Image: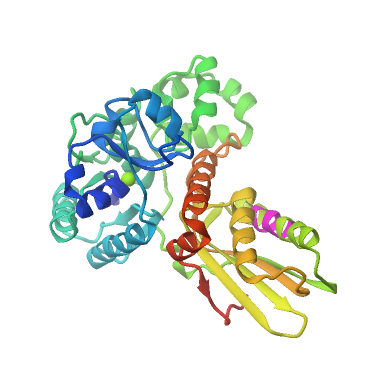
Amino acid sequence: MPRKILHLDLDAFFCAVEEKSDPSLRNKAFATGGSREGRGVVTSCSYAARKYGIHSAMPMAQALRLYPDLIIVHGHFMEYRSYSKLVMRILKNLTPVVEQISIDEAFLDVSDLPSESKRIASDLQMQIYSSLGLPSSIGGASNKLVAKIATNIAKSTHTGNTYPMAIKIIPAGKEKEFLAPLPVKEMWGIGPKSDEFLNKLGIQTIRDILNFPKITLDKHFGKFADDLIRRAKGVDSRLVRDHEGIKSVSNERTFFENIREEKQLLGQIKELSEKVGKRLRKKGLAGRTIRIKIRWHGFETHTRQLTLGQATNHDSVIFSAAKELFFSIWKTGKPVRLIGIGVSKLGEDIHQLSLFNQSYIREDNLLEAIDMINKRYGDHTIRKGMKIRSDHSWKD
Ligand SMILES: [Mg+2]
């Protein structure tokens, strides 16, 4: 029996939440993130704004050039996070097999439910809409890869100012047929650089990958060529996994002599962040919660953590977060005996086929957006928003 996998993605999530608190935004072209001065990036934008070519992760300055009357709304991370939790709770009520992949996206394995995928999807969509007022789109297929692409295609063909609330189910056996005519950039894991590269080789659609001489693909993509071909056929055997059981990936270092120099301490934090990032990438994992552990001169130990909107295994993202956490507890000159960096809330690194090392553009932008909020509202805001928590019991 083929599996029944659903991929759910909330529609313009941050904007939908903002609209709930300010209904006058309805049907207007607005975006969250950045600032009026045009710094930072768009973290989410309404469908009315998308008509002008604006999309999330775009620099705000560019968005304003496209549509100078764009309304900019400051984001409310705490609210997004609590709504996200409520949505995930609804999903987990339906099936225990839920894999959250970002603040507003998750896979569900509904194979054990008797109804058809389409029925399950529309009931679920209605339940989320009626209980939380949040619109969502759902893709369904026999595997994660095709379900995710189905959601994206269903959303991208939507026009108008309203939320798409789309549902697209690809019947088992039709995976390859569904993918064949799509542009290669629709392939999950193909970023802009890979897209450009494939286009240069003459590969425009997913079908072209399958018609391309295997030997040339091998030459260019090495061990990833087989993976690419498998995906182009719509084959994906990965399970929907709840990664909450997997513990964190962390590294710590005890110093020979206590360190009190800021520069030296940051150097250590950077090295540890790189080690953790490397280990995560090696395991094909990414995590959303970054933690720092610090032991002072005695044995007194503190930990702090923050949770990002999107999972990462990028050294510089881990480092920036760890640095932020470090400065929330360290006072200049205070001698440090041990530092540990850990990443938890792990999931599969789903962003890239690992063809090229460029899966991090969005995360960098996200981080930039967080920096922006800090600059405008002071550090306190983001700490609160990002849920930095003191936890004395962190053990590896
Ligand atoms: Mg979304």
Q: Is residue 273 magenta?
A: yes
On the image, the x and y values in percent for residue 44 come to 35, 42
User: Quarter of the image holding residue 147?
Assistant: top left
- Residue at the (77%, 57%) spot, across then down: 267
Q: Is residue 66 left or right of residue 251?
A: left
On the image, the x and y values in percent for residue 311 come to 49, 53
User: Quarter of the image holding residue 304?
Assistant: bottom right
- Residue at the (26%, 57%) spot, across then down: 111
Q: Is residue 54 left or right of residue 217?
A: left
Q: Give the position of the C terminus as an image quadrant.
A: bottom right
Q: Is residue 214 above or below residue 25?
A: above
- Residue in the foreground of this view, choosing between 168 and 323: 323
Q: Is residue 95 above or below residue 153?
A: below
Residue 4 seen in render: no
Q: Is residue 150 above or below residue 94?
A: above
- Residue in the foreground of this view, choosing between 157 and 217: 157
On the image, the x and y values in percent for residue 1 come to 27, 51
Q: Is residue 348 left or right of residue 105?
A: right
Q: Is residue 265 above or below residue 297?
A: above
Magenta highlight: main SS: helix
Q: Which residues are magenta?
A: 271-277
On the image, the x and y values in percent for residue 213 come to 54, 19
Which quadrant does ligand 1 occupy? top left
Q: Is residue 293 magenta?
A: no
Q: Is residue 157 left or right of residue 281?
A: left
Colouring used for the render: rainbow
| Tally of numbered tags | 0
- Residue at the (36%, 48%) spot, across then down: 74
Residue positioned most to the right: 257
- Residue at the (63%, 49%) spot, across then down: 316
